[in-house]
Image (cartoon, helix red, strand yellow):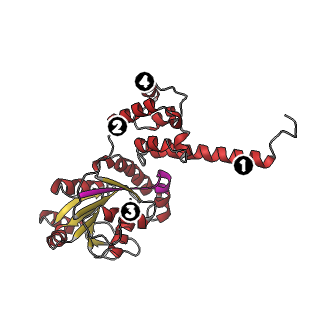
Amino acid sequence: MTDSHRPPDVDRVAASRRAVAARRARAALKKDIAMRVVSPQDVLARSADSADAAASTLRVTEFLTALPAIGAGKRDRVLDELRISPVKRLGGLGARQRAALAEWLDSRFPPVRPRSGRSRLLVLAGPTAVGKGTVAAHIAAHHPEILLSVSATTRAPRPGEIDGTHYFFVDDDEFDRMIDAGELLEYATVHNRHRYGTPRRPIEQALASGRTVLLEIDLQGARQVRAADPSATLVFLLPPSWDELVHRLVGRGTEDEEERARRLRTAKGELAAQSEFDHRVVNDTVAEAARKVVDLSEAPARYPSRP
């Protein structure tokens, strides 16, 4: 190629940067699939949209091996069974291949099936550092018609936390007494260290008076509430990405490195349980996530619902 036909240096640099950015986007997407931050069905749907380059340009082989418990051997058997070439990218799948892959995904990774109807008992759960407390606090500040339940915990207060406002801080003996007296709707040991529980009486009184109640609790507690009251609406709060979840956990600076590692291991297991919930909400911005959570309750609408 002569100098007159060679692309300008600035164009080559820009192209190289775009290629690096595209590789990073695909790597981040594969991590999100592996950590279950995003469902494989969502990725497949997004791949049909040319605006989502990461999903569209992801090779089907990379997509399948990013799925939990899918190795190279299983991947190749699936591709053979579905008659999909290993060189295909998700965005390049034909209608038959896309339908076959979607059916296989639904059989292997059952999607969340939103339940019909709403409840005045709303449960918000999700992995560590996803921002459950921040979203719940935003709802409490902007929707006084919704009672935000205050949990009891055996852990020490963090800077700025007020007893009776953020938590009821109790010792182990008092927590044992509350359990024995049947005063807790649910309780659990979180991160193998501290215990958390929801006092029963304020919830029962609020529901009896016709108010909506929001519980911001962990996965174990959500399961207990579902067992105690099957009509409760369970909402799982998701981070925008796994990397963002790690960033939030590190950024809040309330745990040491060992504790952060422990919480991230727990988060992986919590994300794997999201199919047990009635709805999923991504906490990209606090105000929007809070709006979506409120819209899933029976609380009186304070603003028009949007899709």
Q: Which residue is mark 4?
A: 77
Q: Position of residue 203 (x, y in %)?
A: 19, 69
Rounded to the nearest whole Å, what is the CA distance between mark 4 and mark 2? 17 Å
Looking at the image, residue 177 sits to the left or right of residue 277; the answer is left
Q: Amino acid at mark 3?
A: Arg
Q: Amino acid at mark 4?
A: Arg
Task: Please identify, in this view, whether the residue under mark 3 or under mark 4 is nearer the observer.
Answer: 3
Q: Are marks 3 and 2 in contact (CB under 8 Å)?
A: no
Earlier along the polypeptide chain: callout 3 or callout 4? 4
Looking at the image, residue 85 sits to the left or right of residue 279; the answer is right
What element does badge 1 sit on? Answer: helix
Q: Amino acid at mark 1?
A: Ala
Write the start and end of the magenta stretch as one range.
233-246
Q: Amino acid at mark 2?
A: Asp
Q: Which residue is mark 2?
A: 106
Mark linked to residue 14: 1
Q: Which residue is mark 3?
A: 306
Q: Are marks 4 and 1 in contact (CB under 8 Å)?
A: no
Image label count: 4
Mark linked to residue 44: none
